[in-house]
């Protein structure tokens, strides 16, 4: 299963902060290729990685959830 919305939110937050993939991965305690795969939706984002990434971006985890909400299409009624 692809996790495109999670990865897109991580990518958007990283770009908004002007961070390179290498900078963000090191701050989050992940390898650059692993973060790349998360951003592309190739591997699922685990809770501990979610928290580490939000810390790397110096933002509350709730902000990443807000980003996901902005990316997802509206739900049908």
Image (cartoon, grey):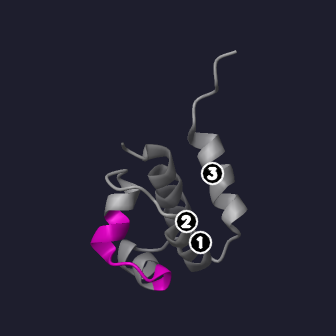
For label 2, count other residues whose C-alpha is less than 10 Å away and answer few (under 14), some (14-19) or many (20+). few
Characterize the magenta stretch by its predominant secondary structure.
helix
Residue 71: assigned label: none
Q: Is residue 65 left or right of residue 3?
A: right
For the residue labelled by badge 3, is the local secondary structure a helix, a strand or a loop? helix
Residue that extends furthest to the top in the rendered view of this protein: 77
Residue that extends furthest to the left in the rendered view of this protein: 33
Residue 42 in the image, given as x and y percentages of width and height: 31, 52
In 3D space, how far apart are the residues under numbered discs 1 and 3 (Cα atoms)?
15 Å
Give the total number of marks visible in the rendering.
Answer: 3
Residue 47: assigned label: 2
In 3D space, how far apart are the residues under numbered discs 1 and 2 (Cα atoms)?
6 Å
Viewer-side label of 1, 2? 2
Residue 74 sits in quarter? top right
Does residue 33 lie above or below 26 as drawn? above
Viewer-side label of 3, 2? 2
* Tag 3 residue: 67
Residue found at x 32% / y 69%: 34
Residue found at x 46% / y 58%: 11
* Tag 1 residue: 51
Which of 14/40 is in front?
40
Residue found at x 32% / y 75%: 32
In 3D space, how far apart are the residues under numbered discs 3 and 2 (Cα atoms)?
16 Å
For label 1, count other residues whose C-alpha is less than 10 Å away and answer few (under 14), some (14-19) or many (20+). some
């Amino acid at each position: 299963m692809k996790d495109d919305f999670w990865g897109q939110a991580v990518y958007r937050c990283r770009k908004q902060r002007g961070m390179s993939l290498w900078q963000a991965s090191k701050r989050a305690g992940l390898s650059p290729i692993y973060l790349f795969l998360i951003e592309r939706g190739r591997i699922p984002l685990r809770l501990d990685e979610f928290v580490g990434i939000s810390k790397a971006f110096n933002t509350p985890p709730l902000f990443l959830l807000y980003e996901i909400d902005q990316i997802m299409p509206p739900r049908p009624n």
